[in-house]
Image: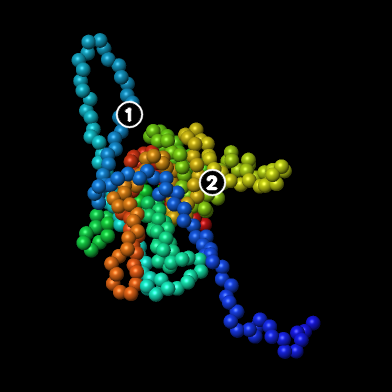
Amino acid sequence: MAQPTNTFDSYDAVGIREDLQDVIYDISPEETPFYSACQKVKAANTFHEWQTDALRASAANAHIEGDATTAEARSATSRLGNYTQIFKNAVVVPDTDEGLKKAGRAAEIAYQTLKIAKEQKLDIEKALFDNNARVAGNSSTARELAGAPAWMITNTDFGANEGADPTGDGTDARTDEVTALTAFSQTKFDSVMQSIWEQGGKPDVCYLSAFQMNKALAFDGNNNQRSQISAEAGKVSNYMAVYLTPWGEITFEPTRENRSRDVFIMQSDMWAVGVLRPTKNVALAKSGDNTTRQVVTELTLVCKNEKASGIIADNTTS
């Protein structure tokens, strides 16, 4: 078949209106499970402090009748602290935008401000998970908060050569293993879980990357139950939401912002975020024919007691 002679088709036409959907599709991940799970507490200084304490170990306790009582030596509480970190993002849009008709958004400044707010939340999640020591800062150096790995020293599993625990007060980071990374395993997980239980912790969530989550799916006692086809539903189940151990019940939470080499076993109520300045969206002073908006948050990570959590560090990631 062929067109009749002199057919004026759509390829010849001028002025056909564009067909652009009035929507913007974006599947970028924006979940922040650790940041969202942390209790938000008020910080009133750029250096936010808290205290920890512990009971002495149990001992034989028997006395004769009429024995004189002697007071035991007591130890003071431990005082810990972390610096608040300023998270700031801004967007500037020329005022010409006010007269433009856009697809998928009414105003560019509002759309871009929402985007940077979401991006900042991801930056906060990353900072909370980072193996980073606290930085006091000065007039030319930004303050930095110490991330979760910098606090954990009691219930840890790490590389045998260079790997080492930090001091545990946020002043230094963990020492990463370089030459002897080993695969994340059920043996490692159960060992750290037992250690946390022996210290008195009650962990309830495990944060780990997608790669390490696939390792967890192969844990014994769980895998055989998930790889069966249900004739009734016509589905294959290969998922682990909760892992039951003698030391507690753990929810596995895949995360995107932590380092894949680190697996965190956390007692959620033993972590908090100290907020000095809640997230705020403000318009900055005009400096020309444009509009600038800033999104700023200032906060820090609070490790209420590191003995309630643990880390399996220096895992292979491929």
**Nearest-to-viewer mark from 1 and 2:** 2
Residue type pointed to by label 2: Ala
Helix, strand or loop status at disc 2: helix
Residue at (58% x, 82% y) in the render: 15
- How many numbered dots are placed on residues in this image? 2
Residue type pointed to by label 1: Ala
Residue 289 location, x and y as percent?
A: 33, 74
Lower sequence index among marks 1 and 2: 1
Residue annotated with mark 2:
216
- The correct choice, above or below, for 106 with respect to 308 in the image is below
How far apart in space, not on screen, are marks 1 and 2 (Cα)? 34 Å
Residue 151 location, x and y as percent?
A: 34, 46
Q: Residue furthest right?
A: 1
Residue at (41% x, 71% y) in the render: 98
Question: Mark 1 packing: few (<14 Cα in 10 Å), some, or many (20+)?
Answer: few
Residue at (49% x, 36% y) in the render: 249
- The correct choice, above or below, for 223 with respect to 315 in the image is above
Q: Nearer the viewer, residue 104 or 206?
A: 104
> Quarter-wise, where is residue 91 in the image?
bottom left
> Quarter-wise, where is residue 141 in the image?
bottom left
- Regarding residue 55, the answer to whether it shows in the image is yes
> Quarter-wise, where is residue 75 in the image?
top left
Q: Nearer the viewer, residue 160 or 196?
A: 196
Residue annotated with mark 1:
57
Question: Mark 2 packing: few (<14 Cα in 10 Å), some, or many (20+)?
Answer: many
